[in-house]
Image: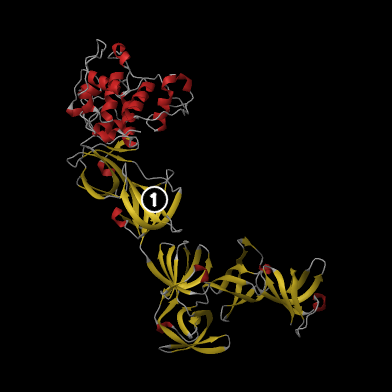
Amino acid sequence: MRHRNMRGLVMTLVLTAVMLSGLTADAATAGTEFTDISGHWAEQPILEMSGYDIIHGYPGGKFAPDNPVTFIEAVVMVLNTVGLSDEAKKAPLAGLSFHPGVTWGKEYLALAVREGMVREEGLPKLEAGRHAYRYEVASLVYHALDLKPDTYLPFADVAAIPENYRSQVGAVAGQGIMRGLPGNLFAPHMQVTRGQMCAILVRLIEEGLVEPPRPMTRLTGRVLSLDDGDLKVGNLAGERVIVLPSDCPIGRGNKTVDRSTVTKGERIRLVVGEDGKAHYAYLPGEYGSAVKVVSGIVNGKTPGLREIYNLSILNEYSNMETYQAYADARVLKNGREAGGAAITADVFVKLSLDQNNRVFRVEVHELIKVSGTITQIEAGSLTLRSRGVKTDYLVPRNVRVTRNIIRDIPYGELESGDRVDLWVAGETVLRIDFLSGIVAQLSGMISKVHMKEVYIYVGNEETCYSLSEQVDICKDGATVAKDQLKRGDYVIFEVDSQQTVSYIEIINEDEGEFEGTVKYLEVFNRSLSFVLAGGLEMDYSIAGGARFYRSGDEINLADIVPGAKVAVTVEKHKITEIVVIDDRNITITGLVANYNPDAGRVTIEVNGYLRTYSLLSGAVVKDDSGKVVGVGDLKGCSVEAKLVEGVINTLTGR
């Protein structure tokens, strides 16, 4: 495609050369003073083209949007819009014959012949007043832009389009310049009105096929402020102050609105003169929802064509990707409105893409450090408990993991219970430092507290632990001072191999969420005892309306097996919810009630309920003395069964 905007677009269009022969432009009607377009479907295209000073109205303030244009007028308008007015004025007429009624526009017709828009042999028959049809306007645009033919025509009346013009109509329709009419019709022989012609010309600029006419410029951005007519607009290029006169037409949807309705943060498109004043403004509204969201580290931002910017990011696979971003893409930094200057090299961004795979929203995140303990970890995510609060984070494939900031290690070496420092942007982890030496998460009751030491009962044993200088002490989700530790407090804490404590969470027995292993369960009395990591046993009654879940499905209280790992929610010292985390990889105790050797299944009475499990082929079966026996020998005996993925792996008498 040959873009006419490369020729230098100088448009000096007067009414005698554009709209209707014999009329001159009326300065009083060149802007917002059209008296007959309010509410017309083409009101905004007319006002925008008037803002570019390409079209004008009739003396007295009328525009006559529904009047048809002549073929010669259409030729002149297209050539001026694609920036060929200067060439037209110099086009030689020698050797060309015109209809006697043609008194103006001959130079434009001569240039149209040279450009292939008009056939020379047809000039003598072309009357000055002959109106232009839709298929003819499509052909003029096709040749003026040097488009490639396109045979795809989605219209129901393709047969009505002259055969020699079909590929030209297809090309213009494919560029979005001319669109179908109700009923999916192209209506090739319908006359083109002045309003329709304005809509077509606007699309040439909107689709980036031509540049706006000099000295006008087209500025797209977001409203940063509007103070006494001074409009500050920001986009990915930066900020600019434009004068928005009180009489400047402003479009929103199909209507013209008052300047007072312009609000901070909304998108705005402006036609700006070389004097810095807006000649037309349009408020297009927000983009739709994101079709796709991508994220990565910014590598660069460069301007492209048609108020489009190229954003290059290093994605989670360590691959470089480049996306096109709208100039007025919304930029947020740490959740707050920001300008394009916030998008700098090496910052982390999330890009929201529309159906055209273009960026309309950029979320910029600064890295922050979060310290805590991994409670759950998977290939692309982890859960961190920090200051008593659990937060889920996304982990990209190219995340860097170090041990004590010195040595790189694989992400796969991290485990639940590891103490780490995360450098995060939003909910995405960009770097992890594993603080080696953390060996356990324990629980217990404080017996004594000193300046640098704390004594804690873990199970039935009192142990003295050193307090790290940076010990993190939390209560009710907030960091508290060391003097908040009191004798008798129940705590969850983390300790390294040197018996140094780096994290202590003071447990509120009456309220909270706890993870542990079920020890006792009384179904009829509705009471539960569970043991936290480290041996702290907690006893609660179960509220009448409590709910119980496994793998997202609701279950009965009796379905919970002693030995299962559970998450328990406590409110006002009563259990209101129990979620079974794992009851397939646990150890259970009970009495062997039955054994079916043919099916390889063992029935065990656990907590007063019969539960049947498959026995692994080759499972180890021993009595209470350690002697290998058959399963049938243990019938009626108390046993301990180790389950692996719900199957008995080891069965031992007690």
**Pointer 1: what residue?**
322
**Residue 481 visible in this rendered orientation of the protein:** yes
Closer to us: 157 or 278:
157
Q: Quadrant of the N terminus?
A: top left
The image quadrant of residue 281 is top left
Q: How is the image coloured?
A: secondary structure
Mark 1 secondary-structure assignment: strand
Q: Please give left or right for residue 144 compared with residue 242 in the image.
A: right
Where residue 107 appears, x then y in whole percent? 23, 20
Count all numbered tags in the image, as a single digit. Answer: 1
**Residue 339 visible in this rendered orientation of the protein:** no
The image quadrant of residue 627 is bottom right
Picture layout, residue 225 above or below residue 125? below
Picture layout, residue 525 above or below residue 381? below
Q: Quadrant of the C terminus?
A: bottom right
Where residue 171 appears, x then y in whole percent? 41, 29
The image quadrant of residue 65 is top left
Q: Please give left or right for residue 427 compared with residue 9 in the image.
A: right
Where residue 138 appears, x then y in whole percent? 37, 25
- Residue at the far front: name it: 95
Picture layout, residue 619 above or below residue 99? below
Residue at the spot x=50%, y=66% of the render? 382
- Disc 1 crowd, CA 10 A, few/some/many (<14, 14-19, 20+): some
Picture layout, residue 479 above or below residue 288? below
Closer to us: 92 or 338:
92
Residue at the spot x=36%, y=21% of the render? 136
Where residue 114 appears, x then y in whole percent? 29, 22
Q: Amino acid at mark 1?
A: Thr
